[in-house]
Image (spheres, rainbow, N blue to C red):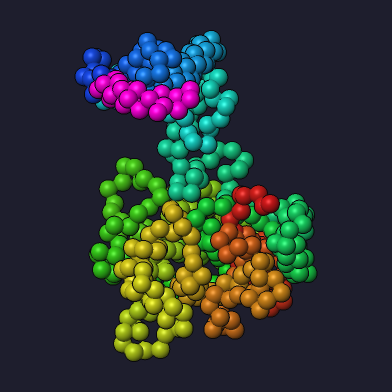
Amino acid sequence: MPRPGGKSPNSFRGSAKSDRSLQKSTVGLQSTSPSGCQGEYQPKRVKKQASRHGDDPHVNCSQLKAANAVESREKAVEQNNERLARLGGTMERRTRPTTETPSTTQDKATEQIGSGEHKPPLSPRVPEEDKSEDDLYRGEDEIEQERIAKASSEEHTFPGSQPLLVSSKDQYSVEDPVDLMTYSQREWRGNTAKSVLIRKGYEKISHEFSQLRRVRGDNYCALRATLFQLLSQSTQLPKWIAGHDMSLLPKKLPLDLVDQWTFPFENQGSSKGAVEQLGHYLKLLKKRWQEAVEARGPEREKLCKAVFQGGEEEYGLLEALKFLMLWKAVELHGASDRGDAVPEFCWLLFARDSSRCPKTLLTNHLRHVGFSGGLEQVEMFLLGYSLQQTIQVHRLYKMDTEEFITYYPDDHKQDWPHLCLLTEDDRHYNVPVPKTPRAKANSSGPSWRVPSGTTAMHGHSSNKTGQSKK
């Protein structure tokens, strides 16, 4: 007996049959859309069936719900398309024609050589860092010109995004000295624990140093600072360098160690290979070092400024320092294989999986210095041994610890000259300028580059900053 207000079981069975027949009539139909996209065609059929039956009790409720959902999605898509159309019209109105200079036109033509066309791309690629809401309302010509200008500037840069030759007043890779405490207060204004610690470190060394020279902040930073102090503070060349024809050193190593040497510049018009180029810059390093030792006062300062201008000579000398490190590594590794005594840092240097021997040291480490990374601490020991200099580094972030002053190496502090460096993070180095001249100073160099006065050492420092601290 049917329930009051309800339907008989037979009517439910009839409704179910109607539902199944309806599904058969609407599902699985072949698409007649030109694109053959069956998924887009089916919802429209469902929608028509649902609207034709209206409130017919024989129509499945789930089918009606699906049709309503599809209809809502279609309305949302239509609204979105309308917004995109309005946005496109806004961009078109804001696009302004620009007059291209001959150089800009030439740059565009050069960029598209081989394509057979000399017209800007339809969809200019905007650099990731330049993407913002404002870009939506800039003309295509504006975006394209900015992209070309940026690409053109990057074509003539060294690794680390530093220009090879700079014609502005900022061309020097080692800046003029600034007051030490003024620099500290300006760069570390915050009240974070690190800011307070770094300022405390600056205050401690201010009793010994009065000024600071900032060094260009690329991946050559440690090498550049070391070379700067060598030329500004040394009183004599190491015996092993003075007694060798430096240009012959690359020929004495296995060819596979040097023939693939990479330089950060292109020596256009030169047919010299890596061996010849390394020999040339090693010879030049010895010459400049000797000239600096013999120079007096303003002449020495002039020599340093002539070298550190971000040009080919500077980077060639930095590569020469890297070769001296490789030369010393070959020597120490051979001594270790023979069972001879070697410095303690060699155990760390050759214990790394990436530098078991001089060849892997070159391939995995030295070759990348200046390009994609700087010197690691264990390689600072190797640099000190290569030059027979004790590199004394004031590590400000190690304030209140026994590592605040570190020596690379630490086993020749009494018999090798000292080169003073300053770092805030073991990555970037600056050059501290002492308050008083050396006790042994006899006008061998300008007073603003005199080393630490606490010990009888030859000051040398280096850093790369260029970045603002927070």
163 or 399: nearer the viewer: 399
Q: Where is residue 456 in the image (x, y as percent from the top left)?
A: 66, 78
Q: Residue 278's image quarter?
A: bottom left
Q: In this view, does 222 lie above or below 45?
A: below
Q: Residue drawn at (39%, 77%), measured in percent from left and top?
A: 351
Q: Is residue 13 magenta?
A: yes
Task: Please state if 21 lies on the left or on the right of 221 as rendered.
Answer: left
The magenta region covers 1-24
* Direction from residue 47 to residue 426 in the image, left or right: right
Q: Residue drawn at (35%, 84%), measured in percent from left and top?
A: 336
What is the residue that sits farthest to the front in this orientation?
A: 1
Magenta: main secondary structure:
helix
Left or right of residue 385, residue 188 in this image: right
The answer to which image quadrant residue 180 occupies is: bottom right
Q: Quadrant of the N terminus?
A: top left
Q: Position of residue 295 (x, y in %)?
A: 59, 62
Q: Is residue 431 or residue 126 the one in the foreground?
A: 126
Figure check: 50 above or below 207 = above
Is residue 263 among the parts visible in the rendering? Answer: yes
Q: Which of 112/327 is in front? A: 112
Question: Relative to residue 382, is residue 470 drawn left or right?
Answer: right
Residue closest to the far left: 30
Q: Residue at x 31, y 68 (%)?
A: 359
Q: Does the magenta stretch include residue 263?
A: no
Give residue 29's position: percent from left, percent from top. Answer: 23, 20
Q: Residue at x 73, y 62 (%)?
A: 193
The reply to whether residue 298 is visible in this rendering is: no
Q: Which of 358 and 271 is in front in this view?
A: 358
